[in-house]
Amino acid sequence: NQNEIECETLPLLASSILTIGHHLHHSLNSNDPSSSSSFVVSAQPYADCGISTYYSSLLTNNNVIDIDTVARDAMHTLIKETHRNQLPYTSSRSSDVWDALIALDGDDSNGDGSSESVRLIYANTFVAAIPYDQGTCEYWNREHLWPRSRGIGNSGKDNTDIHHLRPSDCNINAARSNNYFGTCGTSRLFSECSSPAHLEAAFDTEKDSVTFLPPENRRGDVARAILYMDLRYDGDEDSTTTMDLVSGYGILVSVATMAFG
């Protein structure tokens, strides 16, 4: 049996509460846990994947989402209850996060669903999809946009939630560390800024000891992912923590707080 990547990430649309109008939805459906890690990209969505169907509980009589009246709790409940699959972080028996990232962030220039390369989030370049990191930092690895050290556990759904995982250059990943996303020099002296953020990073990245600025053409993706995590997780599931997005770069913040400015 083959595993399919199918449409299931409409929560990205819900999470962009003030910028509704953009969505990219995905999931990995493992039908046979004993199958190999091979998979195909499928253009066939779930039957209830249409925007009007998915958001039917939030729509007004005019068939729109009124962002002034819709309850945050209602959005949270919707995207939580439709989170159908939890991928294993790494598995030799079934498709896992590695496979999903290759499919979702891969270069499908052939148009056949195959991905021989992946785009690195902070380097903004493509590298070979196989091999990937085996702990040596020689190949690409996986970046948690919302860092594990800021509330993401090692076993809950938040750890393997593809909405905030991206392929990354191992060295740039380390350079970003758990810095907040934002403009360099905002909370520190501008003289502390490094641009690019790393020798292997895209030219328009920046960092200081507190902040990290992704490439311009990936900042929207990052912002939507962080907004989604704030809306999706409130600590009401096993091995998850309440995710709180704040404005600014305070130093004395809780472990599960993420700033974006």
Image (tube, rainbow, N blue to C red):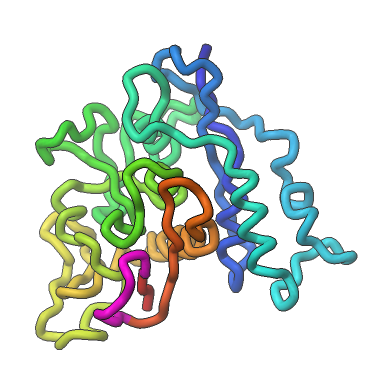
Estimate the x, y position of residue 208 in percent, counting from the top left: 16, 75
The number of callouts visible is 0
Estimate the x, y position of residue 131 in percent, counting from the top left: 22, 28
Say if 41 sits above or below 171 in the image.
Answer: above
Secondary structure mainly formed by the magenta segment: loop
Estimate the x, y position of residue 14 in percent, counting from the top left: 62, 60
Q: Nearer the viewer, residue 27 or 257?
A: 257
Q: Looking at the image, which residue is at 13% across and 73% down?
A: 194
Q: Looking at the image, which residue is at 32% across and 44% down?
A: 154
Q: Nearer the viewer, residue 1 or 231?
A: 231
Say if 76 sits above or below 19 in the image.
Answer: above
| Left or right placement of residue 207 versus residue 69 in this view | left
Q: Is residue 246 magenta?
A: no
| Residue lying furthest right | 61
Q: Looking at the image, which residue is at 78% across and 47% down?
A: 53
Q: Looking at the image, which residue is at 71% across and 78% down?
A: 68
Residue 161 visible in the current orientation = no
Estimate the x, y position of residue 28 in percent, counting from the top left: 51, 32
Quadrant location, the C terminus = bottom left
Residue segment shown in magenta: 249-257
Task: Quadrant for residue 218, please give it.
Answer: bottom left
Say if 128 sits above or below 75 in the image.
Answer: above
Residue 116 visible in the current orientation = yes
| Left or right placement of residue 154 versus residue 193 in this view | right
